[in-house]
Image (tube, rainbow, N blue to C red):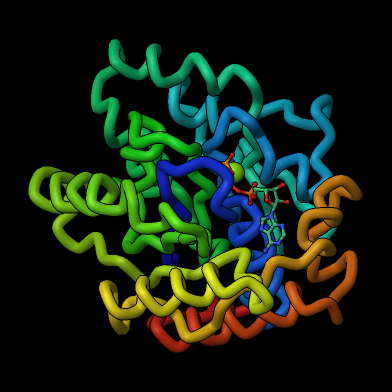
Amino acid sequence: MIRIAVANQKGGVGKTTSAINLATALAATDHRVLLIDLDPQGNASTGLGVARDARKKSSYDILIDGADVVDCFVASGVPNLDIVPATVDLSGAEIELVEIEARTHRLHLALERCDARWDILLIDCPPSLGLLTINAMVAADSLLVPLQCEFFALEGLSQLLSTVERIRARFNPSLSILGVALTMYDRRNRLTDQVARDVRAVLGQVVFETVIPRNVRLSEAPSHGLPALIYDHRCLGSEAYMALARELMGRLPVQKVAA
Ligand code: ATP
Ligand code: MG
């Protein structure tokens, strides 16, 4: 299973929107996809229409109680896409984890115990570099970093990259950066265009060619409990996420699980 953490400690940059829509695009191209919601806000769970009372088991149980992944997922409404939801309990997990053995490896260990029923795992991280995100980085092969096209886009990135370096040095030497995705791009706004060019100049090839536009359908979809790709598959935002998924696949050595 290919494991990708969607991470950036900056809030509101498009992590969850990217996780949901990439997961949907990958599921639509016949991959079996699992999305783990590792954010106490539970936005990925809500955005995929998992009602609060349907979240019997959650990522909290995996991290704190050592529950198995196969006992904690639910099917989303999207064929081929399952989700381990998050509940508000998870907001206490950062503190509870401190007391627990192997606190950085709880997710990794659960995934090691897991059978091979999914091809691709996406992990939606919270906007922090605490133990939840660290668990995701220890468990993942690679990171996808959404970066909002705004003036302070690169601020905080060095902190993220130095965390990645520390994780590599101590726990997970093969952790790589799969790519940086520019989000909320507004072509009528010269600042966002400048930011996009500056980011490419600084980061180079790691930045995906595909840029996610600012698109109202992307922001409306979660209130219907649907990925934008299902809510309106023809909107510019959905098209962009399908293109991003294709580009991402080109960077991955994915093998499908035999049906
Ligand atoms: P958090 O750090 O709080 O988890 P996040 O990084 O997961 O946030 P999102 O929740 O995906 O970010 O996006 C933040 C807000 O911006 C949401 O209301 C979302 O609907 C909206 N949004 C995300 N991407 C776009 C886009 N391309 N166009 C328009 N709105 C967007
Ligand atoms: Mg989020």
Rendered view: 9 above or below 121: above
**Where's residue 182, x and y in %?**
50, 69
- Depth check: give the residue in front, 128 or 109: 128
**Where's residue 44, x and y in %?**
67, 45
Name the side, left or right, on which 170 lies relative to 183.
Answer: left
The quadrant of the picture occupied by the C terminus is bottom right
Point 60% across, 53% down: residue: 35
- Depth check: give the residue in front, 66 or 24: 24
Point 78% across, 55% down: residue: 219
Instruction: Confirm whether residue 241 shows in the render.
Output: no
- Depth check: give the residue in front, 188 or 200: 188
Point 14% across, 45% down: residue: 166
Point 65% across, 26% down: residue: 87
Total of numbered circles in the picture?
0
Name the side, left or right, on which 17 lies relative to 217.
Answer: left
Instruction: Confirm whether residue 233 shows in the render.
Output: yes
**Where's residue 196, x and y in %?**
46, 74
Name the side, left or right, on which 49 lies relative to 8.
Answer: right
Quadrant in the rendering for residue 245: bottom right
The quadrant of the picture occupied by the N terminus is bottom left
**Where's residue 246, x and y in %?**
57, 86
